[in-house]
Image: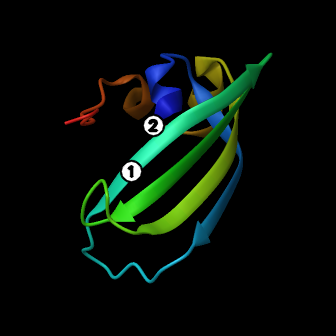
Amino acid sequence: MSVYLFRKPYATGRLDTDYLLPVPVGTTLHLRAWCNGIAGRKAYLEAEGRIGATGGPVAVRAAALFIEVNMEHFAKHGDLAAVAAEHDYEVNP
């Protein structure tokens, strides 16, 4: 989500996810993500998901490396129209 807020296209270079607690299907996870730094085209992010509320137990942690790409990357490797379309994300509801 943080990469979306940068308003630049990024592709996932690496994504490590650690499940600390069981997360049953249908569970509401409150996600918090932050950027640890940007170096050239690389963005380093981390996130955590808490069960049921912002103060709930941490059920999942993630660390990711995203690589800035141009929009032609998605035209060649994905659905450019879907990426270019306006997203309907809830940010800090």
83 and 32: which one is in front? 32
Q: Is residue 21 left or right of residue 44?
A: left
Looking at the picture, which amino acid does disc 2 mark? Met
Quarter of the image with the C terminus is: top left
Quarter holding residue 92: top left
Q: Is residue 49 left or right of residue 9?
A: left
What is the secondary structure assignment of the residue under circle 1? strand
Residue under the point 32% across and 65% down: 56
Quarter holding residue 38: top right
What is the secondary structure assignment of the residue under circle 2? loop
* Mark 1–mark 2 distance (CA, rounded to whole Å): 9 Å
Residue 34 point in image, percent of width and height: 54, 35
> Does the CB distance between marks 1 and 2 fall below 8 Å?
yes
61 and 55: which one is in front? 55
Q: Nearer the viewer, mark 1 or mark 2?
A: 1
User: Which label belongs to residue 81?
Assistant: none
76 and 24: which one is in front? 24
Instruction: Give the residue at mark 1.
Output: 31
Residue 45 point in image, percent of width and height: 63, 38
Quarter of the image with the N terminus is: top left
Residue under the point 63% across and 20% down: 72
Task: Give the class, few, some or many, for how many residues have Cα within 10 Å of label 1's Cα (few <14, many ≥20).
Answer: some
Q: Is residue 33 visible?
A: yes
User: Which label belongs to residue 1?
Assistant: 2
